[in-house]
Image (cartoon, helix red, strand yellow):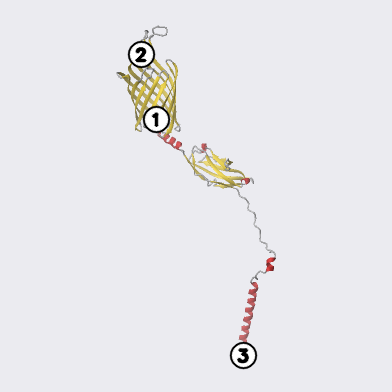
């Protein structure tokens, strides 16, 4: 029994000694694996590390600009930009297209403001949207996309100017018809008027004579509907009788018959300017041949209101020898297809020695697309106790 107890005690002691030895060995191994703190000697020695060195970056040229959201129709689209590393760039190109039109290019050029500028001419800005992208052609021969792309371009909305919008509105008003051909005629009768003249004895006398004329005129008008709203050319003839001052005898004292026949062949170019939405002005040059020879004249008018609707017109015309007229006219659009116009005119035409007054009314109607007809009538006199009626008609075709 005592021998068994001794054997067990020896086995336990051996096991404890073995485990202690293994633990001591593990501690020494862990201590060996921990890095030792640096010493002065080790810090003084140069490092033998083989860490790779950083490679220098390669310059990449770019174009920087503020992409415009809109472009004004009728004005150049100017795009300003700056370049980085321009020494590496052979050309900076603005590629653009409008609608289904083929692609076009504008080159960036150096400007006086020390930047680069690409210009899309105003004549190209037709449509609703312009698309563009920017590419850089490098001196190395490579081409890089600097801004947007052909598949995903930058879009610029083309915006009409105020003048363009006004033109479009007026063109809509006239149903797209810019050309107008017209003809008109009227008969004017002042009744009897007094004509004064000198007698052979040096005194003066007054005669009552017929005072009438007729006029036929043809005209062509074109409507730009911009600053120059319209320009037209009128040509016509006037024939009649008038209280022309006379001499009973000629310079030699011979009796002569007073000539009452008057006439005029004329041409009158006219330009209408738009000063504001409801303010227009007209200028007219008159060239003519009267019964006494060649003569010149001119005229003008101020229009207040809608040029193709309700408006007030104040104007005048004057021709050497033949006379002058001053008028006020109010056009009233009572319906989209009908217009009436009361007219007051003061005139000494044709070739009279004093003025008369005309009170007229005109009505015009659009009887078919682009076709307008009108009638006018009234009363006029050069003296309060004598006067007569007038009447006329007009026809116009627009396309």
Q: Toward the viewer: 287 or 354?
A: 354
Q: Left or right: 48 with respect to 117?
A: right
Q: Is 238 located above or below residue 115 in the figure?
A: above
| View extreme (bottom): residue | 1
Q: Label 1 vs label 3: CA separation?
A: 140 Å
- The answer to whether one can see residue 178 in this image is no
Q: Nearer the viewer, mark 3 or mark 2?
A: 2
User: Callout 2: 10 Å neighbours few (<14), some, many (20+)?
Assistant: some
Q: Toward the viewer: 286 or 19?
A: 286
x, y (%) of residue 65?
Answer: 54, 46
Q: Toward the viewer: 96 or 102?
A: 96
Q: Quadrant of residue 202?
A: top left
- The answer to whether one can see residue 190 in this image is yes
Q: Toward the viewer: 326 or 27?
A: 326
Q: Left or right: 11 with respect to 162?
A: right
Q: Label 3 vs label 2: CA separation?
A: 178 Å
x, y (%) of residue 90?
Answer: 62, 43
User: Callout 3: 10 Å neighbours few (<14), some, many (20+)?
Assistant: few
What SS does tag 3 mark? helix
Residues tagged 1 and 3 counted as in contact (Cβ below 8 A) = no
Q: Earlier in the sequence, mark 1 or mark 3?
A: 3
User: Callout 1: 10 Å neighbours few (<14), some, many (20+)?
Assistant: many
Q: Quadrant of residue 298?
A: top left
Q: Quadrant of residue 246?
A: top left
What SS does tag 2 mark? strand
Name the residue tied to disc 2.
196
| Label ID, residue 71 | none
Q: Earlier in the sequence, mark 3 or mark 2?
A: 3
Name the residue tied to disc 1.
303
Q: Left or right: 344 with respect to 102?
A: left
Name the residue tied to disc 3.
6
What SS does tag 1 mark? strand
């Amino acid at each position: 029994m005592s021998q068994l107890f001794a054997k067990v005690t020896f086995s336990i002691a051996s096991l404890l000694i073995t485990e202690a030895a293994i633990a001591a060995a593990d501690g020494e191994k862990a201590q060996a694996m921990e890095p030792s703190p640096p010493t002065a000697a080790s810090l003084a020695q140069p490092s033998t590390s083989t860490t790779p060195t950083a490679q220098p970056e390669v310059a990449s040229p770019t174009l920087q600009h503020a992409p415009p959201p809109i472009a004004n129709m009728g004005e150049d689209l100017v795009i300003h930009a700056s370049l980085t590393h321009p020494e590496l760039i052979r050309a900076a190109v603005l590629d653009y297209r409008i609608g289904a039109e083929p692609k076009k290019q504008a080159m960036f050029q150096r400007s006086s403001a020390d930047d680069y500028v690409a210009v899309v001419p105003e004549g190209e800005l037709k449509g609703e949207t312009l698309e563009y992208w920017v590419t850089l052609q490098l001196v190395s021969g490579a081409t890089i996309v600097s801004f947007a792309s052909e598949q995903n371009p930058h879009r610029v909305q083309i915006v009409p100017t105020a003048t363009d919008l006004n033109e479009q509105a007026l063109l809509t008003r006239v149903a797209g018809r810019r050309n107008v051909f017209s003809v008109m005629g009227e008969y004017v009768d002042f009744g009897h008027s007094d004509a004064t003249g000198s007698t052979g004895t040096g005194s003066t006398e007054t005669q009552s004579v017929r005072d009438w004329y007729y006029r036929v005129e043809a005209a062509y008008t074109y409507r730009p509907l911009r600053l120059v709203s319209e320009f037209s050319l009128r040509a016509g003839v006037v024939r009649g009788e008038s209280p022309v001052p006379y001499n009973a005898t000629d310079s030699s004292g011979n009796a002569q018959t007073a000539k009452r026949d008057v006439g005029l062949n004329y041409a009158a170019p006219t330009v209408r300017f738009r000063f504001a939405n409801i303010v227009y002005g007209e200028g007219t040059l008159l060239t003519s041949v009267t019964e006494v020879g060649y003569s010149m004249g001119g005229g003008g008018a101020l229009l207040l209101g809608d040029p193709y609707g309700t408006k007030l017109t104040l104007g005048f015309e004057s021709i050497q020898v033949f006379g002058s007229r001053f008028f006020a006219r109010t056009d009233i659009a009572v319906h989209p297809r009908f217009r009436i116009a009361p007219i007051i005119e003061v005139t000494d035409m044709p070739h009279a020695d004093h003025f008369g007054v005309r009170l007229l009314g005109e009505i015009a109607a659009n009887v078919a697309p682009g076709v307008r007809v009108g009638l006018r009538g009234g009363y006029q006199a050069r003296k309060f106790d004598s006067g007569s009626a007038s009447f006329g008609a007009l026809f116009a075709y627009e396309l």
